[in-house]
Image: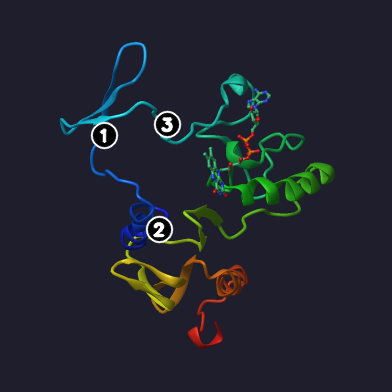
Amino acid sequence: MPQLGADMAAVCATLHRRGGVDLVTGTGVAGLRGTGGVTGVELSDGRTLPADVVIVGIGAVPNTAWLAGSTLALHDGVLCDDGCVTALPQVVAVGDVARVGGSRAEHWTSATEQPRVAVANLLAGRTLRTARALPYFWSDQYGARIQFAGRRHDGDSVRIAEGELTEGAPAEGGFLALYERDGRTTAVLSVDRPRPFMRVRRELARGESRVQPAAL
Ligand SMILES: Cc1cc2nc3c(=O)[nH]c(=O)nc-3n(C[C@H](O)[C@H](O)[C@H](O)COP(=O)(O)OP(=O)(O)OC[C@H]3O[C@@H](n4cnc5c(N)ncnc54)[C@H](O)[C@@H]3O)c2cc1C
């Protein structure tokens, strides 16, 4: 999982396994079996899994076909500056479809925070405010609240700053993990540790280069 990095993705995968889900990775889906209704899923490694219901979750493509031919620049979304403003100052874009300042975030937080900035800029007729907030997402899975904020890069080290892992899975009470590079905190992940998470998130948002574990 590129968002979390391999180590923490493996930890989150244990939530699925603990929840009784058989997580099959490293192979693709070659096809569906059945006539009239599905009876199995053929994997590209040759195995066939029995199935009577299939849910497909393979990502999303921004629906910009209806804008093709307009003067708006499109490239995996509607291209905007840091303030959600397109090449036309009277047109702004927000949420999943908007590539704001070079990146597109498919999260509720972006969809709810960007409109404030976009409308301010729309009314001003130019970009006064920016929406390049610290990336943040959360998800509730198997009764656990997973929260992530920051900009993780490959090669960042991961340190469990609070709580612990038991056999590679979140222990009772969850944990807080800090991603670090050159002594700086780049991102934070928590499972069931919302208060310290929000504190680190605020510090990251303020641009503090170092998060002191003692202050958590
Ligand atoms: C299964 C699932 C789970 C998710 N879980 C999480 C989560 O745990 N945490 C999180 O942060 N985010 C999650 N997300 C992402 C989150 O739902 C999206 O980031 C958010 O809904 C984006 O909001 P939006 O308003 O930009 O787009 P949308 O919610 O997609 O709304 C766009 C609307 O525009 C309409 N539309 C499209 N084209 C046209 C057109 N030409 N004319 C008129 N209307 C049009 C669509 O029908 C739709 O109603 C999840 C998404 C999915 C699919």
Badges 2 and 1: C-beta atoms under 8 Å apart? no
Crowding near pointer 2: few (<14 within 10 Å), some, many (20+)? many
Provide the secondary structure element on which disc 2 rests: loop
- Judge by depth and name the residue closer to the eye, 11 or 48: 48
Q: Residue at x 31, y 11 (%)?
A: 35
Mark 1 close to ligand 1, CB under 8 Å: no
Provide the secondary structure element on which disc 3 rests: loop
Residues under labels 2 and 3: Cα distance? 23 Å
- The type of residue carrying mark 1 is Gly
In the displayed structure image, the side of residue 32 where residue 152 appears, left or right: right
The picture places residue 183, in percent across and down from the top left corner, at 41, 79
Please name which of the two marks, 3 or 1, marks the residue nearer to the observer. Answer: 3
- 3 or 1: tag closer to the N-terminus: 1
Q: What residue is disc 1 on?
A: 28
Q: What residue is disc 2 on?
A: 4
- Judge by depth and name the residue closer to the eye, 90 or 161: 161
Q: What residue is disc 3 on?
A: 55
